[in-house]
Amino acid sequence: MDTDDRWAITETLSRVGHVFDDGRLDEIDTVFTADVVYDMSAVGMPVIDGIGAARELAQQLGDHGPIAHYVSNVVVTGQDGDQVTVDSKGLMLMADRTLNGVVHHDVLRRESTGWRIARRLVVPQGTEVPA
């Protein structure tokens, strides 16, 4: 994997916060594949199946869910062709002003439009990944 791919992957992960925090849900396809599975059950939120469901949940949560997302410590942990596994750390500022530290375990796919998240598992910092 070259530096350009690593940069594009990190940019995709960073863009998630901008898309959701700014309410730019019409740009959700710039971060997720159409068939994304986004599992937030370990932080008390649902498992989302598909880009439409992700958009719908964001609209439903409105001001009750996370209001700011931050990502850091991005590490590509594996690659199989046009698919990579990536771990990163994140902070979620909630509407009640509490701050939650999380770890993202992602699978990204290279599509014709660039790298997109196909699967995301979010777990609280210090929690083991469910089997």
Image: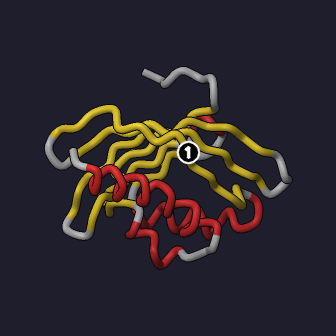
**Residue at 55% across / 45% down in the picture?**
72
The residue closer to the viewer here, 63 or 105, is: 105
**119 relative to 53, above or below:** above
Question: Given the image, on which type of amino acid does mark 1 rest?
Answer: Ser
**Residue at 57% across / 67% down in the picture?**
18
| Quadrant placement of the N terminus | top left
**Residue at 49% across / 43% down in the picture?**
39
Looking at the picture, how far across and down is residue 95, in whole percent?
80, 57
The residue closer to the viewer here, 43 or 4, is: 4
**9 relative to 84, above or below:** below
Looking at the picture, how far across and down is residue 3, in whole percent?
28, 51
Looking at the picture, how far across and down is residue 119, in whole percent?
38, 46
In the figure, residue 90 lies in which quadrant?
top right
State the scheme by which the image is colored: secondary structure
Q: Residue furthest left?
A: 81
**Residue at 25% across / 70% down in the picture?**
113
Q: Along the horizontal axis of the image, is 27 left or right of 21?
A: left
Q: Is label 1 in a helix, a strand or a loop?
A: strand
**86 relative to 116, above or below:** above
Estimate how packed mark 1 is, as few (under 14), some (14 to 19) or many (20 or more) residues with alpha carbons within 10 Å. Answer: some
| Quadrant placement of the C terminus | top left
Looking at the picture, how far across and down is residue 110, in whole percent?
23, 56
Residue bearing the label numbered 1: 72
In the figure, residue 80 lies in which quadrant?
top left
